[in-house]
Image (tube, rainbow, N blue to C red):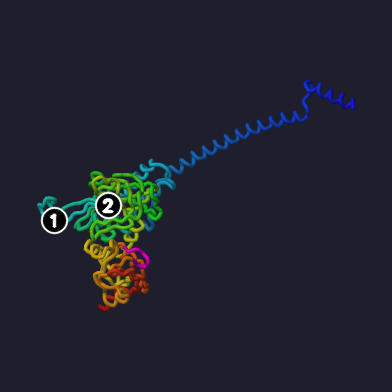
Amino acid sequence: MENNISNQTDFNDNQTGIKPSNHQKYSRKWYVKLTAYVLILTFVSGLTFGAGYLSALIYGDRLTNGIISTSTQNADDQPATAQVQPILSDYTASSDISAIASAVSPAIVTISSYSEQTPGGIFGNSNGFYGGTGSGITFKMEDDELLIVTNYHVIEGSNQIEIIFHDGTTVAATVLGYDSTNDLAVLSVDTKMLKGKLDQIVLASFGDSEEIQIGELAVAIGNPLGPEYASTVTAGIISALNREIYINKNTSYVNLIQTDAAINPGNSGGALLNGKGEVIGINSAKYVDTGVEGIGFAIPINQAKETMDTILESRSGGDIAYQLADDRAFLGVQVMDITTEVYNSTGMRFGVYITDVIAFSGAEEAGIQSGDIIYSLDGKKVQNVQVLFDILEKAKVGDTLEVGIIRNDEILTLKAPLYSYKNIMDQQ
């Protein structure tokens, strides 16, 4: 017992003067090693960041230098033209607007249309013509012609049309056809009239209007108030989609893009662009009223392309809205939009009013009658005549469609087979 106490006392007395134990030495070595590791890691991270930053500068510069590479050479010896490429894969700031304007403005032309009037009239000139202006978009070069799309109301009733290009070159144009219900027209310019300037022609690129999102960047380019203000650029956002506006009982627009980018008289037929510089709409109308500002509308480009393709297939020079191909699916009704009189008597704000039913047609077979109002077709809401035509254009001969009918105070659903237009007309 005593020896144990003596040993313990000796241990306590030596605490202030003993050498560090092995455990204490290990603790200090661990701290030094940790500090060294941290310093090495910091140094290596700095090198990695620096290398990454340098790579970003090098490759970013290469990408930047190539974002508006527009040089193309058409196959089979077509004239060389520039095709606008998407400006950026992912735009991030409004500064991109200047790049969009620079790339796309040359593809926007001024359209001057002239209608023959009584010579000496207030609005006439010495040749007896009245002129108006709008905008157009060059979009395709094929064979010996340059193709331009614009609004139908820009060239409506004209006897003579001129195209004024970005550099002031002015040439005559021909109407290949138009669609009065969709307010679109396609014009053609003989490339022989652009001799020596073909390499300066720029063709716009079309985007996908189905991918548009509310709130994204929208850039409008057009020629408000005539060629003196050519290539005017305004910017805003996509304010809304699928808008419907009604001009009068014969003219209405559906599925429009709404934007707050300024659209003024003369902008009609010009381009509404996304942040990549792609055409997503054709500027068509503006809401004008006291105290209202920043409400403009454009036809979605996907919808416009369908009409343009139909026009280029027919090349009739006339209105394709009322041209029925012999093999076209035909319901067999004559219709009109809802008028004030029809609304007052039926209470229906939308739909199409049937004025006549064609004998031997699917409509007659289904029991549809004059005075009925079609409010739905094939399960889709029918707002007006244009929507009815759009649905029927996608249908095929032999299809049977469900037709939603309002008759007096009854709601009916009838099934109407579709026969070819020629088949019905041959029986009249």
Q: Where is residue 272 shown, x and y percent of the image?
A: 33, 50
Type of amino acid at the residue the image marks with label 1: Gln
Q: Secondary structure at mark 2?
A: strand
Q: Where is residue 184 shown, x and y percent of the image?
A: 28, 58
Query: Going 52% across and 40% down the picture, which residue do you hit?
Result: 55
Q: Which residue is mark 1?
A: 117
Q: Using residue 158 as the reference point, say whether residue 41 is left or right of it.
A: right
Q: Residue furthest bottom?
A: 427
Q: Quadrant of residue 140?
A: bottom left
Q: Which residues are magenta?
A: 376-382
Query: Going 10% across and 54% down the picture, which residue do you hit?
Result: 119
Type of amino acid at the residue the image marks with label 2: Ala
Residue 160 painted magenta? no
Q: Which residue is mark 2?
A: 285
Say whether disc 2 or disc 1 marks the residue closer to the N-terminus.
Answer: 1
Q: Let me know if residue 191 appears in the view.
A: no
Question: Which of the pair 71/402 is nearer the observer?
Answer: 402
Query: Going 28% across and 65% down the picture, which residue do you hit?
Result: 352
- Locate the C terminus by quadrant: bottom left
The image shows residue 111, relative to residue 334, as above or below, that is above
Mark 2 is surrounded, within 10 Å at the Cα level, by few (under 14), some (14 to 19) or many (20 or more) other residues, namely many
The disc at residue 35 is none
